[in-house]
Structure formats: C-alpha cells, structure tokens
Amino acid sequence: MEKQLFSSLNKLITPEIISKVSSDLGENSGKVTSAIGAIIPSIFGSLVNRGEDSNVENVLKQAGNSSILSNITELFSGKTNPETQNIGSSFLNTLFGDKINSFSGIISSFSGLTSDSTNKIIGMISPLVAGFLGKKMLSGVSLKSILEQISSEKDNFLSSIPSGLTSVLGISSLAGLGSSFLNKTESHTKEAVDHMKNKVEDTYEDYKAKLNKKSGSGWIKWLIGILVLLLLLFWLFSKNSCSKKEMNPGANSNKISDSTSVKDSISLQEQKLKQQKQLTQISLPSGLKINAYPGGIEDQIVKFLQSNEYKNSTNDDLKNKWFDFDAINFEFGSGTQLTPESENQIKNIVSIIKEFPNTKIKIGAYTDKKGNSSANLKLSQQRADVIKDILIKNGLDKQVVGAEGYGDQFAKVDINASDDERAKDRRISLRFDK
C-alpha cells in the first residue's frame, strides 16, 4: 500500500481531466478544481468517521472487482456504464445516507459550481475513490488497515473539508473527525486485553489446583502478581497510544503546507501584535478617510500610488513589487470563507483602488514548504481566486486583471522551522500593473 493514499488518489486526476470536465460542463476550471479538492477529502473524512462498516466493505470489494480504474478518462466523460454509476451511488448512500443532498449543496456553495455540475462531478469522483480503495483490498489490504492509514493522513486533507460538513458527518467539529474509529480501535484493544487476562487467570487456577496438592506453592502468589501487573501496564500503554493518535492524528504524515489548521495568513503571535496596535485614519485623494493600521498594506499602497516611483515604473518594474495583506485570514478548514475580521481590509482596498481608476492589480497567494507541493499549489490558487472574486463583486471588475497561486514556489523558510517562522511564507499579496 502506498505511503500516502490521499496524494496517490489525487495524482489520478490530471490537469487534462480537469480541463475536459470544465469544458464539458461549461464551468471555470478553478471552480472544478475547488470542488474536487473538497469532495475527495470529504469522502475520506466520512470513511474515517464511520469506521469499520460491513456495507462499506461490500461496496469497496464490488468496486475493486470492477473496471473503474481501467479507463479513468471515460469515467470523467459523463458516459459511465450502469455498473459504475451503481457503485458510486451505493458508496455515497453508505457514507452519507439521507444527507447526500446536503453534502452536494455544501460542495456547490464551497466551489461556486451550479448544483447540476456539482452532482455530476460527485458522480464521477465517488466511484473513482471506491475503485481506488477497492483495488487495495483486492491486493490483500484489510479495510481496517485502510481506515487506519486514512486516519493517519488526516492532517493532509482535514483543512480541505468544508466546515459546513460537520453536521453531515455527524460530528461537533472537524477536529473530532475519526474519533469513533479510534474509540472502536481502543475498545477492541481492551477486549483483547480482557480476553488475555481471563485466559491467564483460568490457566493459573488450573495450575494452582494441581500445585495445591504439593508443598512449596507460595511463590505462585508472586507469579500472579507479576502477570497482573504486566497486563495492567500493557492495557495502559495501549490506551495511551490510542489517545495520542486521536490528539495528534498523522503526526508523521505530510501535512498540507498552508497549515490552515489555525494560522492561515499570519501567525497567532503576529495577530496579537496587530490587535495591540490602534487603527488610525488614512486620507485618500478624494478626502475619504479609512481606518487602517499605520504602516499596513493600506498605508503602503496609498503612499506608493502617489509616489514618483509608481509614476515612473514600467510593468517590468512592478512585477516584483508585491504588497502583503496583513489582516486577511480564512476560516478554519476553509479555502474560501474569510473571517469577519478580514472584511474591513477588503473594503479598504476596494476604496483605495477606486480612487485610482487607471490602476490595475493582480492577486498572488503563497504557502510555506510544509506538505505536498501539488496540494499547496491548488490551495493557493483557490485562495487567490477568492480574493479576486470578492474584489470584482465590489466593483473592481475592470481593475483586477489576474490572480495566481504560487504554492510553495517562493517559500524561503526551512520546512523544519517552527510554525511561527513558516507563517512568513503563508501570505496573500497584490501588485500593480499598467
């Protein structure tokens, strides 16, 4: 079995497939990528949360015996055969039950796709995931082993699951994902220990009855004491191991870089420092005043746009002069939902750019080096598109000329550095164009 199921599965969906699906559905490729990037993690999350289920096992075995993986291009053509459609439908029903429509609605809202397009893409992805995992089972890997590996990779896909899916998955928060499976594993461990303990006690009682006929059996008390102590130590160790997995799932797995796991754009320490600063009023050419941090991005770009440096700059000069947003953050586990605190800076940027109607801007998004480069690139593109779309909806449709996610391409901080240090590489920026 591959070291990383999640990344191996994602590699099956090539840029050519994304392009074809986008073309066939008449949808933006970025939105299609966003939807697929949320559907697969959500299916994985549901699998982990449900734990071992005989219905899941049956569907995966059926999928493994099918020809789903033999022609993936056909799978994404929208012309799948009835068997494949049935497998995908059964798989989804087993995972989501009567909440399938809720699942589809959340993915549609998350990605920006129409409901029809979302349902079609879900219909393509679900049999692919089932076929992929089913083949693993046919090769001799048990469902329990697959679930354990998916659980260990949880940090790789947790941040890509839309936060609205918590109710669909039947959990209070994404942080609790997979707890039922871990609890079941712990329960199985306890049962095994209890069974072993009973066996030892039964064997001892039989042996004691025989030894009672002889003298010198006092040492047996010491023996049983030692055995019971060893059993207790084994039980405590097993319980502690399960608890650690739940508290730190996938500690050795390759985390998605951007660590949307709490700090997306700036570190917690930097956020606290920001909160300690007081907002000040910045005057725009029209006399309009906005509230912003002194020395922040608003202050910087207003001064730059009024400077001779900007007036004398060529497009080549401007390409390397980026301004980093310092108050833009995304909700936990989301690549599209901004925090309420981000709205003020978005409004400020809109007001500033409107003051300079001949100015054009481009959005860039970056991640740190932690994690899978392909996943980092997708997430950064998603976030760049989100900022671009928000600015366009606020009246900058003629001034926003592009948005690009660069992933970890320009990250400078070492992958093994602390999270606060790597936060410098996780940013969203803008630059000007003429």
Image (cartoon, helix red, strand yellow):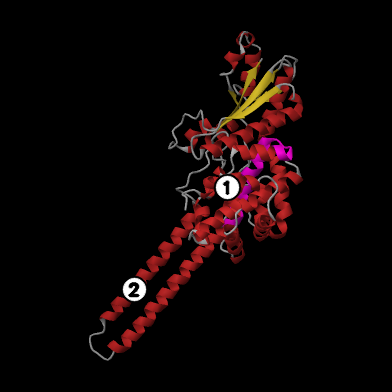
The extreme left residue here reads 216
Q: Is residue 106 left or right of residue 411?
A: right
Q: Main secondary structure of the magenta part?
A: helix
Q: Nearer the viewer, mark 1 or mark 2?
A: 1
Residue 186 makes an appearance in the image: yes
User: Looking at this view, is 148 or 242 the one in front?
Assistant: 148
Name the residue: 74% across, 37% down: 26
* Label 2 SS: helix
For label 2, count other residues whose C-alpha is less than 10 Å away and answer few (under 14), some (14-19) or many (20+): some
Q: Quadrant of the C terminus?
A: top right
Q: Which residue position is annotated with label 2? A: 227
Residue 112 makes an appearance in the image: no
Label 1 vs label 2: CA separation?
42 Å
Name the residue: 64% across, 44% down: 36
Whether pointer 1 and pointer 2 mark residues with C-beta atoms closer than 8 Å, the reply is no
Name the residue: 52% across, 59% down: 137
In this rendering, the answer to whether 351 lies above or below 76 is above
Q: Which residue position is annotated with label 1? A: 158
Q: Is residue 283 left or right of residue 146?
A: right
* Label 1 SS: helix
Task: Residue 337: give x, y in percent of width and height.
Answer: 67, 39
User: Looking at this view, is 417 or 408 the one in front?
Assistant: 408
In the rendered image, residue 35 lying in the magenta stretch gets the answer yes
Q: Which mark is residue 190?
A: none
Image: magenta residue range: 23-48
- Which badge, 1 or 2, comes first in the chain's sequence? 1
Task: Residue 20: give x, y in percent of width and height.
Answer: 67, 38
User: Looking at this view, is 193 or 157 the one in front?
Assistant: 157
Mark 1 residue type:
Leu
Task: Residue 383: give x, y in percent of width and height.
Answer: 63, 34
